[in-house]
Structures are given as C-alpha cells and as structure tokens.
Image (cartoon, grey):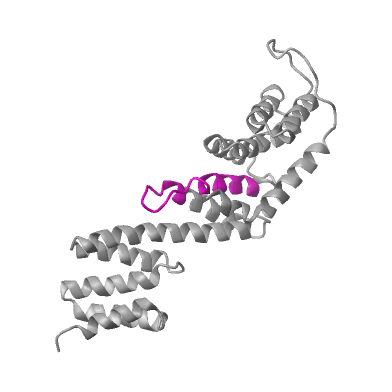
Amino acid sequence: MRESLFASSGVRRAALALLLGASLGLGACASSGGDEEDYVEEPVDDLYNRAMDLMQQGDERAAARAFEEVERQHPYSEWATRAQLMAAYAFYEANNYDEAVAAARRFIDLHPGNKDVAYAYYLIGVSHYEQISDVGRDQKMTELALEAFDELIRRFPDSRYARDAEIKADLARDHLAGKEMEIGRYYLRRGEYVAAINRFNNVVDRYQTTTHVAEALHRLTEAYLALGVQQEARRTASVLGYNFPGSEWYQDSYALFAELPQ
C-alpha cells in the first residue's frame, strides 16, 4: 500500500524537511575520514553529518546505522536524541519496517515529552500501513497501523500528521471490515448462519463508517430469513432501507421478502 502513503507525501516531506532543517542547524562540519576498521571515537558533528550525507546519497540502510553510531558514541548529546528519530526514518525509507518501528518506539520511550513524538507515532503507523495485505490474509498489520494512528490522533489532534493519520485510519478500518465481510460470506455460503450473523454484526457495530455496512445489513437480513427469524430480518431490512434507501443491497433485501410465501 505504498502508493497510499505517497498520495499524501507532502506531510511526509514536510516532516522530513523539519528534521533535516533542524539537523543541519546543529552544525555543517564535513564528514571526517578515518579507518572504519579501528574504533576511534569521533566528534559528534562529524558522525551526524556523515549519516546525513548517506541519507542524501540515497543509502538509507547505511545512514540508519550511521545515526545509531551517533547515539552509541555520544549517548547524552542533543545530536543523539535527533539521531534516534532519524535512524527510524532511515530504516523506514529503506523498507526495513521492523527496525523503523523499533527505533521509533525507543524514541517515544526515551523522550515522551519531545516535540517530535507525534512524528514517531506517524512513522510507526505508516511502517505497519505499508505492509497491509489483501483481505484474504492475516490483518495483524492493519490492526497495528490503526492502533498507532489512533494513538497519534488521540494524543496530538492538532499536529501536522493528524489529518493524514485520520485518512489512513479510515482506510484501515474499511480493510478490517472487508475482512469481516469475507469471513461472514464464507459462513453464509456454508449455511453456518449464526457464525455469519456474528461477523456481519461486527461490521455494523464496530465499523459503522465504512463502505461495507449496507452489504452487512443485507447479509444479516439474508441470514435471519434463512434461520426463519422473519421479525429480526424485517427489522434489519428496515434499518438498511432507512440508511441506504437507494442502494442495490436494499433492493436485494426487498426482493427477498417479495419471494416469501404469502
């Protein structure tokens, strides 16, 4: 789902610009040379600027390791704090999502009051979001993405990342609803009506703002009629007709009642 992120790349690029601008403001020393095989403690600005150079060259994996080296050699410096978040961003850009999430979570744990915590949550969210698979597969990544975006929205509703997080959270919910619908339809085809009803009710109760609610109400009507519970079927169809009067799903439900013996 990488293309979904780039649809709002202005948010991501704006965030990176802030990070880069603040980083470059800390110093502009040239990268130092030296033999990488022998450990020699280097000035913090040299280490940091080397990592920045690697980012700008497009070598994100090496940049991430270089940012980690800043913290390793100078753990209590201002540079180390920023390097932690930059390492998370570099891992993300390298599609190394597990390490991006781990680095971002570590930043949050160590610096809960830092002004960039909102961005750390955003990185966690998009790292999971870009691993979302189709509804036929496990949706753990969808759930983790939604959890991170919801936390960001709850804690930082006015941040520059909140709007994009809201959009992605809505898409994640729609994906989870789609998974419930797929399982519900499977049970319905097998004649396991109670199990199907439970799944469709999940969609109606938990994912009310998604695109799947109208179909879920129709499938509920279908399942109740199959069980012979006509009163519940009529109630559900009424809800469907009230909320989605012009939908094909309401028409299908209406047709089901027309087919009942008089």
Give yes or no for residue 131 being in the magenta stretch. Answer: yes
Image coords of residue 112 (percent x, y): 63, 43
Image coords of residue 34 (percent x, y): 77, 14
Image coords of residue 120 (percent x, y): 62, 44
Residue at 37% across, 78% down:
248
Q: Which picture quadrant has residue 156?
A: bottom right
Left or right of residue 56: residue 214: left
Residue at 73% across, 33% down:
57
For this orientation, the residue located farthest to the bottom is 262
Left or right of residue 68: residue 99: left
237 lies above or below 135: below
Q: Nearer the viewer, residue 116 or 239?
A: 239
Q: Which picture quadrant has residue 203?
A: bottom left
Q: Main secondary structure of the magenta part?
A: helix
Q: Quadrant of the C terminus?
A: bottom left
57 lies above or below 13: above
129 lies above or below 47: below
180 lies above or below 103: below
Give yes or no for residue 121 being in the magenta stretch. Answer: yes
Q: Which segment is the magenta one?
A: 118-143
Q: Nearer the viewer, residue 163 or 79?
A: 163
Residue at 34% across, 69% down:
216
Left or right of residue 222: residue 144: right
